[in-house]
Each structure stands twice: as C-alpha cells, then as structure tokens.
Amino acid sequence: MHPPVVMGILNVTPDSFSDGGQYADLPDAISRAELMTAEGASIIDVGGESTRPGAERISVQMELTRVIPVIEELVARGMYVSIDTMRAEVARAAVTAGAKMINDVSGGLADPDMLTTVAELGVPVILMHWRGPSKTMQEDISYDNVVIDVCAELQQQVDKALAAGVAKNNIVVDPGIGFGKTFEHNWELLHQLEALQALGFPVLVGVSRKRFLGALLAQADGTLRPERHRDSASAVIAAQILRWGAWGVRVHSVRETLDSYIALNAIDPHVVQDRIELMGVRDFGYHGVLAHEKEQGQYFSIDATLGLSIAHAAQTDNLADTVNYAEVADAIRARITGDSLDLIEKLAELVAQDCLAFPQVVSAHIRVHKPDAPISGDFADVVVSRYKHRS
C-alpha cells in the first residue's frame, strides 16, 4: 500500500465556501500551511480564486497578488506546493515562485494556453472533470451515465494534454466531485472509483466539506449540516478512497483524514492496491426465479476485480507468482453455465467464493450483469455487485 498522498487545502480567498477569509492574510496562511504539514500533508494546494458554486471570476492580477507571496514563503520553508488555478499566467508565475504542481479544476478548458504552458514548465498537472465556470456549473448536470461520461470527458482532456506535450507521467485526473453533478452523481462516482482508475492515471479525489455531505448529514427537516461540521464524514470517506487505491485526496482536515486512514487499516487490513480485472466474462445460464428463465435461459456477463499483490510477479515475470486469470475466467463460466439458481445475488456470492479459492487472491469484487432480466419497459442492464475478502 503506497503512503497516502494528502493534499492540504489552503484557500487564500475571502469567499471560499467553507473557510473564506480565514487565511487571506499572509501570516495566517503560513501558520495554516505549517500546521497541515506538521499533521502529515504531502502537498499544500494554494488557491486564490474561489470555485464555489455561483462564484464570480476575479482578475488575473488579484489572483497573483493573493497567491504568489504565499507560495514564496511556503517554498522557503521547504513545503511542496501546488497552485490551484485555471489560468496559464498564474500557473507560470506560481511555478517560477517555486510551486511544483498545477491543479486546474477546469482540466485545461478554461484557458487555451494552460496545457501548452504545463508542457513547457514540465511539472505535474491535475486535470479535473469540468463542464463550465463556477457561476453556471450546476446548469449542465445531465449525463446518460455519469461514470462513463465523466471518464470519457476526462479522457478527452488527457488526450489534449498529451497532444500539447504534457508527459504522461505528469498527469493526475480528478472526477470533480461536486462540480456540475447532483448528490447522486457524486456517490455513484465514488462507488465506481475503479472506473476512473482504469483510465491509467493517478486519481485525486476531493470530497472535503462538500454539499453532498451536508445533505447526507442533514437534519430531519432537510437543513444541511454546516460546512465546518462535515469534517468527520469528510475524513472517513477520504481515508476509504485512499484505501481503494486513489493516488491522493484533497482535504481541509489533514490529521482527521490520516487518523481515519490508520484506524480503518487497523480494523480491516486486507485492502490491497494491486488488481487484476476480468471484464465481461460472458456465457449462457439458467438463473432466475421465473419458470421461463430456468427453461429458456439467457446470457449473463460477469466482471471480476481481484485484489492481490503482484509485486513479486512483477519482478520474477513468472506466472506461478500471480493468479492465472484464464483459470479464473474458466471458473466464472463454470458458475454461469452450472446449476440453476434463483437469484443472481447467489451467483455473485458463489463466483466471489470461487475467486477467493485461488490462494493469491485476497479480495474479490464481483459484478453480475443480467441485461435480459424480465423487466417491462426500456432498461439497459441489471447489475448485482458483491465484495468479499479473505477472512
């Protein structure tokens, strides 16, 4: 398990959604950054322009005035600094001042010069999923499938970055939780983090104090939990995201996040970061409650994400040191074509057990697709997901 990358949020703005004005003065900003570093922050992300929903843009000069003195002071104290900006001019000035990373919440869309500037500077860049400026970002929240659409739109920005000359190993992607998404969209993206990881780039996720957590913790009358009282939930979710294999998380509360990470690992040490994924293992079976399902049958498709360490096999290049995924696929097909079951929930359970029977496999995340389920009206698929780890 890689050491967790925790990016501490330092908003040097008067109007950020949860801490606006607290760190707008240079001494306060430095003290805050020093505290987050002492608590374990790997990166201090300095932002001079609020990206809260509805926020108006500020001038380039105002943004520079806010962030450059802070960056210079933090770099002088040996901190690893990221600049949170959508402007190429600010990014360039920040890197000149010592920043080592650019965090662009627009994914390079807000400024046509950003990606070529990043390539020229040769520093890592975080490309976030974005559909428009803060003032209007909640106006375009229609998705056919939020996970598929976000991945596709992020891939487009990655392709543009690569075409502009940004090195592949300098790209990090961010699904943009809370940006142009409903509460349900945010949860779905978090539940399917592995789809973002499948893009092949490190994934950064920011959930800290966001509105969808305020809704999760709302009072009975619907009143949202205030921003500053969302830290416990923020920390637990960020810690779990790290355990699921995200490269990093962006947080307000560094200590609480790392404490949660340590505690979750203590109670469940079986989370592994290496995976082998078998997608769309398909065959014909006779599973279902209805008589015609058992008589006529239908096709089922299964995705299996196997958690295991591949570190040794990566060194030896020996099949005996990992799991033979062809054998796993055969086991999955045998279950699909085997004894008839009433429920695909049971099928998912048995497939998970079969996968854990391979000695190298520590965990199995099984998704059983039943696209021809007996449901009236239009629908795309029925999926049952089962996660098991070795006890």
Image (spheres, rainbow, N blue to C red):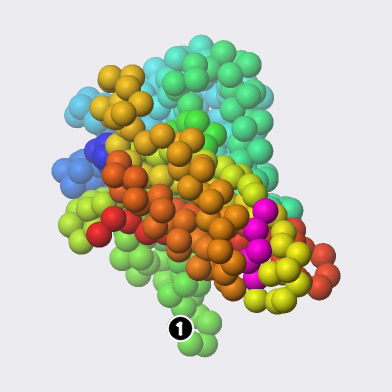
Relative to 197, say whether 108 is above or below: above
Residue 333 point in image, percent of width and height: 56, 49
Residue topped by disc 1: 219
Q: Is residue 340 left or right of residue 374?
A: left
373 or 207, nearer to the observer: 373
Q: Residue furthest bottom?
A: 221
291 or 231, nearer to the observer: 291
Work out whether residue 358 can be spotted: yes
Relative to 307, say whether 73 is above or below: above
Tag 1, which secondary structure? loop
Give the amino acid at mark 1. Answer: Gln
Q: Could you tell me which residue is drawn at 53 percent across and 68 percent down?
A: 345
Residue 344 point in image, percent of width and height: 57, 66
Occupied quadrant, residue 372: bottom right
Q: Is residue 234 left or right of residue 148?
A: left
Residue 314 point in image, percent of width and height: 32, 23
Q: Is residue 286 magenta?
A: yes
User: In which quadrant will I find the N terminus?
Assistant: top left
User: In which quadrant will I find the C terminus?
Assistant: bottom left
Q: Is residue 118 magenta?
A: no
Residue 58 point in image, percent of width and height: 57, 41
365 or 301, nearer to the observer: 301
Q: Could you tell me which residue is drawn at 54 percent across and 23 percent down?
A: 89
Crowding at dot 1, Cα within 10 Å, few <14 / some 14-19 / many 20+, comes out as few
Segment colored magenta: 284-288
Q: Could you tell me which residue is drawn at 45 percent across and 61 percent down?
A: 350
Which SS type dominates the magenta stretch? loop
Q: Could you tell me which residue is drawn at 67 percent across and 45 percent down?
A: 149
